[in-house]
Amino acid sequence: MQKLVEGIHQFQNGIFSSKQRLFEGLMDGQHPLALFITCSDFCIDPNLFTQTEPGELFILQNVGNIVPPYEAAEGGASATIEHAVSMLGVKDVVICGHSHCGSMRVLLDQSQVAKLAAVQSWLCHAESTHRIIEENYAHITDSAARLTATVEENVLVQLEHLQTYPTVAAALDRKALNLHGWVYKFETEQVYGYHPQDGQFVPIEGTKFTSPSATLELPLI
């Protein structure tokens, strides 16, 4: 706690003054560039690796960057999605997984959370990910490679779930929204984006970015 308190004082006495106008401007309302859905793991700081300022991202972080299907949705995740798309009018939604994801490791071996009912219930929303790995990746026995495949497949599964939300479907239909699947490899600072045309994740490079079509052509799951 002492480190947190010291950080508050450092922010108030050194950083805030240089960004005071930015924070004052936020009082006029929220106009985020994107809804950014990612994992709550310790290594993920979306504003840091996208170099965005407060107010530029509407961030949803949870265990495993999971989006419950609309029919099973309740609570914060679904409310955040509807708020961002319908009320804030974001033009882009990013679902971002990451390397060495502890949540995906647990998904592959749920004996680790045998006594954690809430975690087990939450991971049910990634059951399709688990099934895809079991049925389609049996040939991958290396644990690191298997985990990487799980992280990537889970991003695609959650993008499928996202499209079950009426607000998202409506925005996609009128071509007012783009969906993006990313994987952040924090140990090398690389970010990979899913390219539907190639059916794979490729490095996001350069300073120009061409948005994919409004609805990603995802594989059926």
Image: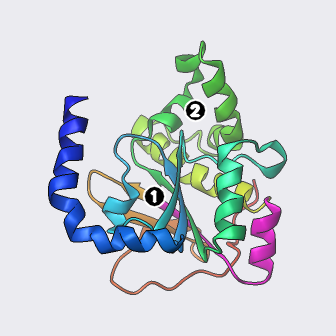
| Residue 189 in sight here | yes
**Which residue is located at x 55 percent, y 25 percent?**
109
In the shown orientation, is residue 178 left or right of residue 57? right
Query: What is the magenta range?
Result: 165-182
- Colour theme: rainbow
Residue 207 part of the magenta-drawn span = no
In the shown orientation, is residue 163 left or right of residue 63? right
The x and y percentages for residue 214 are 68, 79
Does 198 appear above or below 41?
Answer: below
| Residue 190 in sight here | no
Q: Report the residue marked by disc 1.
A: 183
Residue 171 part of the magenta-drawn span = yes
Q: Report the residue marked by disc 2.
A: 107
Closer to us: 77 or 182? 77
Q: CA distance from mark 1 to mark 2?
A: 17 Å
> The disc labelled 2 sits on which kind of residue?
Leu
Q: Quadrant of residue 87?
A: bottom right
> The disc labelled 1 sits on which kind of residue?
Val
Does 70 appear above or below 121?
Answer: below
Q: Along the polypeptide, which appears first: circle 1 or circle 2?
A: 2
Closer to us: 123 or 47? 47
The x and y percentages for residue 221 are 75, 53
Looking at the rendered structure, the secondary structure element under dot 1 is strand
The x and y percentages for residue 62 are 54, 43
